[in-house]
Image (spheres, helix red, strand yellow):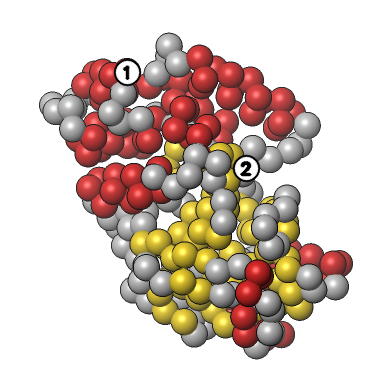
Amino acid sequence: MKTESFDVISIPAFRDNYIWLLRHGRLAAVVDPGDAGPVQAVLAREGLQLAAILITHHHADHQGGVAKLLEDHSVEVFGPGAESITGLTTPLYGGERIRPFGAFGAAAEAGEFQVLAVPGHTLGHLAYVCGNRLFCGDTLFGAGCGRLFEGSPEQMSASLQSLAILPETTEVYCAHEYTEMNLRFAAAAEPGNPAIQQRIREAAVLRARGESTVPSTLVLEKATNPFLRCREPAAIAAAKRHGCAGEDPVSVFAALRAWRNEF
């Protein structure tokens, strides 16, 4: 996949994780390397020099490979300053702009990333945006969102809305292959939504071929992801069937997320 300044290579890890390797010429940056082995293999195969590591949050499947990578590569590690991140050199809190390839003399077109604070899954969770690419960790998934391990419904709802206002052409690079599972819930929440039924069919074809459903696009998420549709009448009705007393987006989100936890 090609963006304005770098290719994106998907590196599967564990059962359903994705590590994202960003390739600019012979340089590479990696997002959420939970396992060093697959990253090292791609670096060797492609003849790449690691230039930077970007971490979205502190969970082990997102940063577990950092220590091993740092044994062989002296690079900058960007990540949440509010969380415990292995090898962190550049703490971030949201609102910053960073150039992961800059320390290696890459030209300006290598890409400036906007850092977004998206608390909810964890309190210090970050997302990174460059051009029309969004690397959002466990905040926004294909047809779903992350569990609220540390944050509140208010925080996660606000974080999702901060992503929803990005351009609709934005490509969503989340960190897990959860789309088919999430679509089953989306269909239960909005059984009359034809876009969800179409996405179910398309995802089934991709997975049957052994292909990824990620990245998706923001326009697709806004049409099929119940957690971005908390103002839609069908989503409100579904939330009310599961104990929601109000119709405001935060209450609807909280009810849908609680239902999803048990789905």
Mark 2 = which residue? 214
Q: Residue at x 52, y 66 (%)?
A: 113
Q: Secondary structure at mark 2?
A: loop
Report the disc number at residue 128: none
Q: Residue at x 36, y 57 (%)?
A: 118
Q: Nearer the viewer, residue 142 or 97?
A: 97
Classify the position of the C terminus by image quarter: top left
Disc tally is 2
> Where is 175 relative to 68, above or below?
above
> Where is 44 relative to 21, above or below?
below
Q: What amino acid type should be assigned to the residue bearing mark 2? A: Val
- Label 2 packing within 10 angstroms: few (<14), some (14-19), many (20+): many
Q: Secondary structure at mark 1?
A: helix
Mark 1 = which residue? 234
Q: Is residue 217 visible?
A: yes
Q: Residue at x 38, y 35 (%)?
A: 228
Residues under labels 2 and 1: Cα distance? 26 Å
Q: Residue furthest top?
A: 192
Quadrant of res 49: bottom right
Q: Residue at x 41, y 48 (%)?
A: 163
Q: In screen coordinates, is 196 left or right of 12?
A: left
Question: In the rendered structure, which disc, 2 or 1, sits on the residue that comes first in sequence?
Answer: 2
Residue 177 lies, in percent from the top left, at: 59, 43
Q: What amino acid type should be assigned to the residue bearing mark 1? A: Ala
Quadrant of res 68: bottom right
Residue 202 lies, in percent from the top left, at: 65, 24
Residue 139 lies, in percent from the top left, at: 43, 50
Quadrant of res 64: bottom right
Q: In screen coordinates, is 200 left or right of 37?
A: left
